[in-house]
Amino acid sequence: MIDDPVLLEWHLRARGYPTSSHEENKRRLYLLVRLEAHESNFLAWQQKLLNTETWAAWERLLRADTRIKEFRDVWPSARQLYVKSFAEEVDRLIVDDGNCHMVQIPLLASNALSEEPVAGDETAVTARRAAE
């Protein structure tokens, strides 16, 4: 699905999510996959299957994700698809942080991790160096 722009757009639209370019749609899908993992860990913590230390680390990841603009774009549509206790936790994190911490993460160039960075794209160079 991720390599098929038409199928990916259909998948997102069918669930009420905003769509735009194929690259941005892939990012939305990735955020939705992360939301599934966050909810699973939250429910495991609630059922005492995950210790508090592990949940605290995972909650920091969830909080970081709630600060991403694309996350805030999909959350109103996604919210209804999750259990109430998890949705309320995400809402609480968003309210606690307010809009002042929201971040926009730029897309990397398609060859950001290749041997040749895009001319003038310092983000691609940094990403390639980090991967080495």
Image (cartoon, helix red, strand yellow):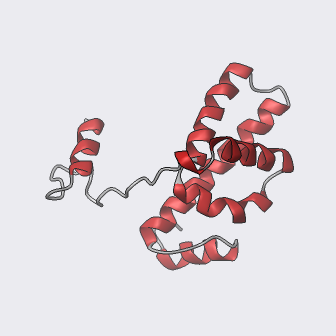
Q: Is residue 4 left or right of residue 93?
A: left
Point out residue 103 in the picture as x, y percentages from the top left corner: 48, 50
Q: Is residue 93 left or right of residue 84?
A: left
Does the rendering let one see residue 2? no
Residue shown at 78%/50% (left/top)? 87
Image height check: is 128 above or below 32? above
Image height check: is 107 above or below 127? below
Q: Is residue 113 left or right of residue 118?
A: right
Point out residue 112 in the picture as x, y percentages from the top left corner: 26, 53
In-front residue for pair 100/85: 100
Q: Is residue 44 left or right of residue 71?
A: right
Q: Quadrant of residue 57?
A: top right
Quadrant including the N terminus? bottom right
- Number of numbered discs overlaid on the protein picture: 0
Q: Quadrant of residue 85?
A: top right
Point out residue 3 in the picture as x, y percentages from the top left corner: 45, 68
Residue shown at 37%/58% (left/top)? 107
Residue shown at 42%/66% (left/top)? 23
Does the rendering let one see residue 123? yes
Quadrant including the C terminus? top left
Residue shown at 73%/21% (left/top)? 52
